[in-house]
Image: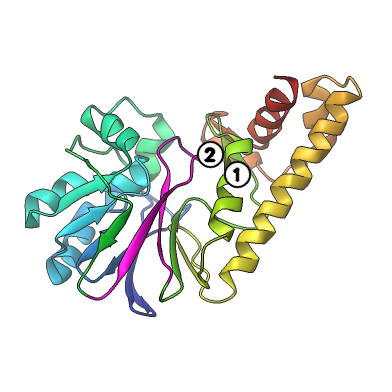
Amino acid sequence: MNVVKRKKFGPADAFLFGYAPVGSPVMGVYCYHIDGIMIDTAQSNMRKAVLRFVESIRPDRILLTHHHEDHSGNAAAIRELCGAVVMGHPLAAEKMKQIRPILPYQHLIWGRSTPVEVRPVPEIIETGRRRLLAVHTPGHAKDHTVYVDQENGILFSGDLYLGKRIKYFRSDENIVQQIESLKKVLKLEFDMVLCAHNPVLENGKAHIAGKLDYLENLFGNVRRLVWEGRPVKDIIRNLDEGRDRFAKWLTMGNVGFAHMVRSAAEAVMS
């Protein structure tokens, strides 16, 4: 069953896409449009539906929060359709020059991105009526960038937020960088968090602060156990609440709670 919805969050158009070959989608993906700018492009498995929406808005610029396939999946197709300029962090530009192979679960849920030219995004993106500030926020991905309209209190957060108590990391995520990125964003002015998977329309700063508190507490617990001389495998067993079992099975171990613990332990021991 596929999910296609169009919503309105303040001045932003929101498009929700969910794909599943059978049953319900594992995770929906939002992309956003405001003043001729599209933030992220959703998964290529939903390309036909995405392009139907793009036909109605015809953006002139695309801002990628990062290169992952559920965010960049349709960037090349949208550029071809309406000539939109694709922009993102320089590391995203490098990633999008040549797409590397992805794992089976990524093919199943999202689909593969297509190479596309990504121009370096400036710190300030001007539209006809507003100014978006680009802020590099690594941790989930090295190229991760959020876009904030401080005057109107909107944070386009990509995958920085996701939830106050996340269940797992990808194998390449960095908990220390995520903590620093959350702290950086909390210095900005916003109330609405337009997340790529879990938008928060009110009290967004409190939600970002909640995730920061959760990650700092987890890091503190891991640090204490490392200093006690506990092996990382024992620390994982000690802290694991078992909430990642389906994700761990589906992704063949590429996603799991253990990656959160390992990232923290490696930082403590370095």
Q: Which residues are magenta?
A: 129-150
Q: Residues within 10 Å of mark 1 (few under 14, many from 20)?
A: some
Q: Residue tagged by mark 2?
A: 139
Image position of 225 (left or right of 23): right
Q: Are marks 1 and 2 in contact (CB under 8 Å)?
A: yes
The answer to which image quadrant residue 98 occupies is top left
Residue 39 appears in view: no
Q: Position of residue 56 (x, y in %)?
A: 15, 71
- Counting residues from the start of the chain, the first of labels 1 and 2 encountered is 2
Helix, strand or loop under label 1: helix
Which residue is at the far right? 228
Label 2 is placed on what type of residue?
A: Gly
Image position of 235 (left or right of 244): right
Helix, strand or loop under label 2: loop
Q: Residues within 10 Å of mark 2 (few under 14, many from 20)?
A: many
Number of the label disc, if any, that sits on residue 180: 1
Label 1 is placed on what type of residue?
A: Glu
> Is 57 situated above or below 165?
below
Q: Residue at x 41, y 74 (%)?
A: 151
**Real-space CA distance between mark 1 and mark 2, rounded to the nearest whole angstrom:** 8 Å
Q: Residue at x 15, y 51 (%)?
A: 85
Image position of 258 (left or right of 238): left
Residue 70 vs residue 268, the one in the foreground = 268
Q: Position of residue 48 (x, y in %)?
A: 18, 56
Image position of 238 (left or right of 55): right
Q: Residue at x 24, y 64 (%)?
A: 126
